[in-house]
Image (cartoon, rainbow, N blue to C red):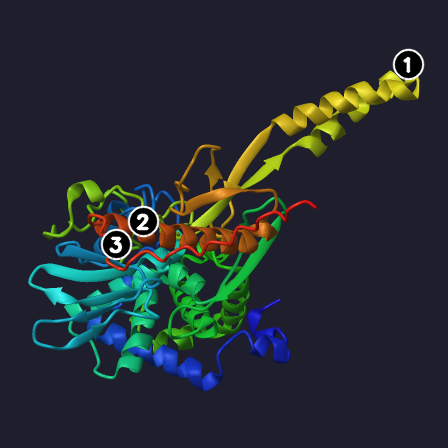
Amino acid sequence: MDHADEPRDPLPGDELVPPPEEQDRLVAGMAHLMRRLGHEPFVAGPLFQPTAEDFPEPLRATRRSVRELLGRLMSYAGLGALRIDLATFDSAQPFVELRDDGTVVQSPHNTAAWFTGIEGDTARFGVDLQQLDDIEKLAGILCHEVAHAFRSAHGVVVTTRSVEEELTDLTTVYLGFGIFTVNNSYLHRSRRIAGSMMSHEIRRQELGYLGPQRFAFLLAVQLVARGRARAAHGRILGLLEPTQREMAREAMRRLLPRRKTLCLELGLPPEEAWPPLRSCDPNLAPAAPARTEDTAPEDDDEPLVHDGQRPGVNRDRVVFRIKHDHALLGVFVAIVPALFMIGALGPFGAVIPMVIGLVWGAARVRYECSDAECGGRLEGEDVTCPRCGGTVGGTLRNRHERLAAEEAFLAERAADQRAARRRNARSADPPGPAVRSKRPARARKQRPVRKPAPRV
């Protein structure tokens, strides 16, 4: 069936793509960008993918790894000649800075990462440590910041911030970063919460300024305009999040019948004049870091997060060991031998394997941190949690006892501190020599002696 003869979908399909006027605005924005900077990256540049082929460096939550990821993205954007200055910040611990001139600077908030400009040969970036729990999401965030640097380096920045942010999102697709930023436009994550019972937390998050419909539409525009690489469309769509995949597929279905008109609206030259497709070059040297005085080389490989948990997040707080054993598992394992023993010795023969299984399971004990966001493995003698830095205040059988145990622990610690202050106050002021009172001693009142009556 020819695409032009396909029936139009009802309303649910319309919800997967932007309104017609928004589609025209997005196409016009991409056409304007290509008039300024050329069409080669859009029609012939590689579409970067979250694979080891495109990103050969191991991705870890360390400063070195984040800088290498940022440097590779800069090189892919044609900015490899610039050096990188990377700052890190934890939005969970905000601060206020008072500068020498008396101005007050608030710490960044609601900002996953930032680009502050290019000074000389150095591009300055910052990253919120809260974003390092998902490296692929962080890559999409950094793609947006690299697009900021690209627009700054080529002098196409506009003064209206909201418009500039939307144009920066559009630029990520132009540069070939569309898979990352389209996925970041709507994230649906389910993760296991540590504990003795299996439980999950579902998080939905939208990053970027265009929104998932417009992002997916822009990527569909790029795929349809390329046309000659249509064989790779299915593989590209397979790398998208489920929601964005449906949006991009619907947009492509509508754009394919009018591909020639779309290319004209984008201002593209005849397809014969296009440059050959460029493949990703993983051997391209990433942009070099700019070493600053406050960044020591030995800190580069220090983990900034541990399995999604920032180190020291519970420092100066109390946590507890949650004790788990495998007594029930031992009884379950003993069921089969118990059935054989019943056949050999009668009903009482099941007692022996059941007791052995119970003792075996009860002896297999493990401990974990009571903080639900941590759940780190603990040993019986640990006084601090190696994962979150919390002070271990004791051992509990159940996680639900944590709040009451924490209140009791803090009350006991406060009483100990008050007693210690009293002891220190007494020891700081030693008693002087004893002084006798000049007040005369009070005379003791003597009882009259009763004489016995004479006998008659």
Residue 53, horizontal then vertical, whole percent: 35, 43
For residue 336, the mark is none
Q: Is 31 located above or below residue 298 in the figure?
A: below
Secondary structure beneath label 2: helix
Quadrant where the N terminus is found in the figure: bottom right
Secondary structure beneath label 1: helix
Q: Which residue is mark 2?
A: 423
Q: Amino acid at mark 2?
A: Arg
Q: Which residue is mark 3?
A: 70
Is tag 1's residue or tag 2's residue first in the polypeptide sequence?
A: 1
Is tag 1's residue or tag 3's residue first in the polypeptide sequence?
A: 3
Residue with the most extreme top position = 344
For the point 75% across and 30% down, the residue is 332
For the point 27% across and 69% down, the residue is 108
Q: Amino acid at mark 1?
A: Leu
Q: Local crowd at mark 2 within 10 Å, few (<14), some, or many (≥20)?
A: few
Residue 107, horizontal then vertical, whole percent: 25, 69
Q: Determine whether label 3 and label 2 are within 8 Å by CB.
A: no
Is residue 451 toward the left or the right of residue 74 in the image? right
Is residue 424 toward the left or the right of residue 368 in the image? left
Residue with the most extreme bottom position = 21
Q: Determine whether label 1 and label 2 are within 8 Å by CB.
A: no
Asked whether 32 or 338 is in front, the reply is 338
Q: Which residue is mark 1?
A: 345
Q: Amino acid at mark 3?
A: Leu
Q: Is 396 located above or below residue 108 in the figure?
A: above
Res. 213 in view? yes
